[in-house]
Image (cartoon, rainbow, N blue to C red):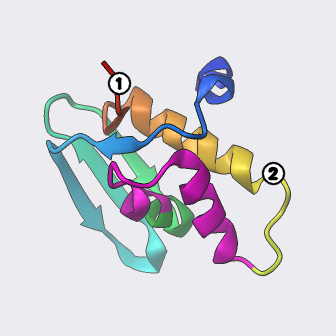
Amino acid sequence: MNMNAVNEIDLDSRPIRNPAYALQEGSCGWAALVNLDTPAGVAVNATGLLIWRRIDGIRTVREIIREIKGFFADAPPALGDDVLAILDVLLEAGLIGYEVNI
């Protein structure tokens, strides 16, 4: 993973899903996300799936982090960095992009 990309994510940006994806939910909270345009895929745990479900082009990265933290009463301080890292993995797999202002 490119840690520089994690540090460069604008918390006010709005991630959007690539519409060409397939989601296969498995047991124990795990799921597979596959980019149908390429052979790229990502396995995500239950937290990754919570993040994926909030990527709608409306919520900002900051809002997604806040919502994910709300699911965990004892959320560690690094949870925001973990969310950014997952977003970076999804971006590298071509499963998400970010709104571009023209």
Label 1's element?
loop
Q: Which amino acid type corresponds to the residue marked 2 in the rendered image?
A: Ala
| Residue 82 - label | none
Q: Nearer the viewer, residue 31 or 90?
A: 90
Check disc 2: other Cα within 10 Å, few if <14, some if 14-19, many if 20+: few
Q: Give the prevailing secondary structure in the magenta stretch.
A: helix
Q: Nearer the viewer, residue 5 or 10?
A: 10
Q: Earlier in the sequence, mark 2 or mark 1?
A: 2
Q: Is residue 66 left or right of residue 95?
A: right
Seen in the picture, residue 82 relative to 85 is either above or below; the reply is below
The percent coordinates of residue 79 (x first, y second) are 74, 56
Q: Is residue 100 highlighted in magenta?
A: no
Residue at left offset 60%, top offset 39%: 11
Q: Nearer the viewer, residue 9 or 13?
A: 13
Q: Is residue 68 highlighted in magenta?
A: yes
Label 2's element?
loop
Q: Give, as a single range, the part of the protein colored magenta.
A: 51-72
Residue at left offset 63%, top offset 29%: 6
Q: Are marks 2 and 1 in contact (CB under 8 Å)?
A: no
The percent coordinates of residue 84 (x first, y second) are 61, 41
Outermost residue on the front side: it is 102
Q: Which quarter shows the N terminus?
A: top right
- Say which of marks 2 and 1 sits in front: 1
The percent coordinates of residue 44 (x first, y second) are 46, 56
Q: Is residue 36 left or right of residue 8?
A: left
Residue at left offset 61%, top offset 66%: 68
| Residue 78 - label | 2
The percent coordinates of residue 60 (x first, y second) are 50, 49
Seen in the picture, residue 50 relative to 98 is either above or below; the reply is below
| Residue 101 - label | 1
Q: Is residue 48 left or right of residue 65?
A: left
